[in-house]
Image (cartoon, grey):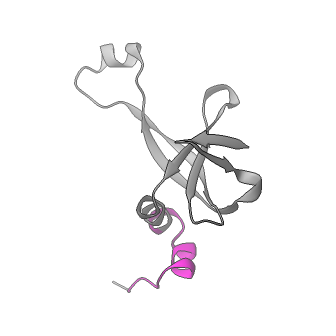
Amino acid sequence: MQFVINGMKYNTENMEEVAEVRKWYQVNKFFFSAMCTGKEIGREYQCKLWKSAKGNWLLTHERDYGKIFGEAIQEEEAKKLLMDYATAIYETMYEKLPEA
């Protein structure tokens, strides 16, 4: 899959798939907004986290009807997602987390 985000080309065939994680995305649909006034409505998606050889991060997920979306994210967000959903991978890439 290839995405062009902020003038940069992200091609998953040339990137390392690091982990599967989850992320919440807000849904901006009139129907939901009308029914739940004043509340944030959203959905959590199963995502794949990718890293390029240059150290750039990409998050991909499948939405309605099989369409794949890509989002460029910063390393800090990638670290948080790894810490929450792929702790062993986080510890391999960064640092061992202390025991409680």
Q: Nearer the viewer, residue 75 or 24?
A: 75
Residue at x 51%, y 63% (from the top left corner) = 85
Q: Locate residue 58 relative to residue 33 in the image: left or right.
A: right
Q: Nearer the viewer, residue 49 or 10?
A: 10
Q: Locate residue 66 relative to residue 36 in the image: left or right.
A: right
Residue at x 31%, y 31% (from the top left corner) = 40
Q: Nearer the viewer, residue 86 or 5?
A: 5
**29 in the magenta segment:** no
- Which region is colored magenta? 83-98
Give the farthest residue toward the left: 38
Q: Position of residue 2 (x, y in %)?
A: 71, 43
Please identify the quarter of the rendering in which residue 88 is found. Answer: bottom right
Give the farthest residue toward the front: 7
Please identify the quarter of the rendering in which residue 18 is found. Answer: bottom right
Which image quarter holds the C terminus?
Answer: bottom left
Q: What secondary structure prevails in the magenta region?
A: helix
Q: Position of residue 60 (x, y in %)?
A: 61, 46
Residue at x 40%, y 13% (from the top left corner) = 31
Please identify the quarter of the rendering in which residue 62 is found. Answer: top right
Which image quarter holds the N terminus?
Answer: top right
Residue at x 57%, y 74% (from the top left corner) = 89
Q: Position of residue 4 (x, y in %)?
A: 62, 40
Q: Position of residue 51 (x, y in %)?
A: 61, 62
**88 in the magenta segment:** yes
Q: Nearer the viewer, residue 16 or 30?
A: 16
Q: Locate residue 76 relative to residue 20 in the image: left or right.
A: left
- Residue 95 higher or lower than 28, as above or below: below
